[in-house]
Image (cartoon, grey):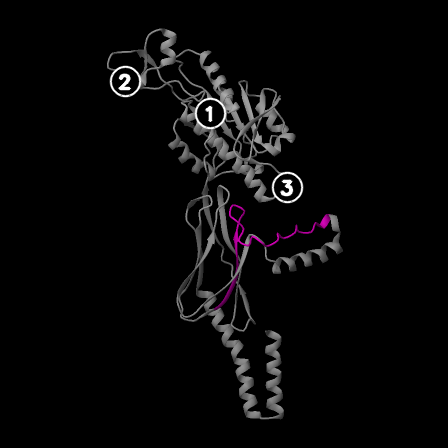
Amino acid sequence: MTVGYFCAIGIALVFMLYMDGQIGVMMLSFLLLMPAVSCAITWFVKRSLHISLEVQDSSAKQQKITAVIRLQKNTVLPLPFLRLHFMADAHFEPLNPLAESLPPKPDREKLGALRYRFASRKWEKRKRSQLVPDVLPLCLSMGTARSAEYRIALTPRFCGSGTVQLQELVLSDFLAMFRFRLKQECSASLLVTPEIPELKANSTLFRSVSTAVSAADEETESTPNHSASAMPGYDHRDYIPGDSLKRINWKLSSKRRHLMVRQDEPIALARLSVVLDFRRDARKLPMRTRLALEEQLIETALGFLMLCARYGYPCRLCYNDSQGEWKSLAIDDGERLAVESVTLLRGGFRPAEQLEGVPRLSPEVLQESGSVLLYFTTFADPDTAAELEQYASPLYLLVPENEAPAASVPKNGSLWLVTADRRLEPTGEEG
């Protein structure tokens, strides 16, 4: 456009000098005035333009949602052309499913200075022109209206905190001769809730854990002062006619040979702890592959907790919150688990550097004895195995099935696999 416009100015000069001076002057004046007017309009609009991006707070997986790009200006001057890139991270379905991913950026150390400069320029040029799956290029414009909305359809794919943002915002005039880069940062987050699978009670792991929990119960008195979760359980007394049958402890009654009733104030409970390790391993994996493994782990852990709650096994969930601090919560019903599943995703998996110095087991878990521990992690390295060996009670290490060959198993535990269809399979490997 710029080259053609200069050619038009040259033609006006030739027309003014050799054909008709008066008309040529009018033509030349018009051609010189137009860019100045176009630039002035664009500059005034740039000063009054406000851009925002909005999405809803949360959504279920595979549920269609809409991201709203809102443009507002406090002038009647028209908005020429606003070019931008709408980006949705790997938590969402690709915006351009058929597009190819951008190749990795050239490595300076491998190519050397001269070859790196050539390859880097070629890569930058390809980045500007190639359509990629997660980026949607847009060109927006407005007339004299002071506000406008543009809607983009999205489909969440993986649970977690998904992010959408507007990048490379450039405002150009009507003649595409002047460009103004906007420094506004527009981004929004969406919490994609997990699907808690319904695990079967006849699974090998559940039977093994049930046996271990029952063995732990038999080693203690029927009314201990504290449980493994440091949460109170129930004290007992003799049955009095008129007491609710739901409060009878049938297991204890069979041992005492007379009916025993739970009192209102609890003092002993959970013998099962489920720990979610939110450290993200440093290996180079495609983000969609990484998110699939993390979702596989989170949903399976929640499904096992739901199974335990359904069959009356009080348990405790431990994880690092958004601040990196250990959070421990007793889970005794499915409703509380559903609420907590949303809370734990606000922190979610993060680089190991953000949890540097945080132990892999909470102090509460380490100080207790007699509790069965299920430890879910995406990658069990030797450091993880060494820290888990401090735990003296039965320990089950659970990793995604494709991570099993590289997993380090603690000496006091056994290795179990989390499959893609949310099943739990034994490997027979023990430390």
Q: Alpha carbon of mark 2 to alpha carbon of mark 3: how far?
A: 58 Å
Q: Alpha carbon of mark 1 to alpha carbon of mark 2: how far?
A: 28 Å
Label 1 amino acid? Ala
- Look at the picture and state if 154 lies above or below 379: below
Is 233 or 291 nearer to us in this picture? 291
Q: What segment is highlighted magenta in the picture?
A: 80-109
Can you identify the residue that label 3 sits on? 284
Quadrant in the picture for residue 15: bottom right
Mark toward the start of the polypeptide (1 vs 3): 1
Can you identify the residue that label 1 sits on? 201
Mark toward the start of the polypeptide (1 vs 2): 1
Query: Image check: 309 left or right of 412?
Result: left
Residue 244: mark = 2
Locate residue 105, reporting x and y percent. 66, 51
Q: Residues within 10 Å of mark 1 (few under 14, many from 20)?
A: some
Q: Residue at x 44, y 22 (%)?
A: 229
Q: Is residue 408 part of the magenta span, yes or no?
A: no
Q: Residue at x 41, y 17 (%)?
A: 226
Query: Image check: 104 left or right of 320?
Result: right
Q: Is the magenta region chiefly helix, strand or loop?
A: loop
Locate residue 243, reporting x and y percent. 26, 15
Locate residue 405, reporting x and y percent. 65, 30
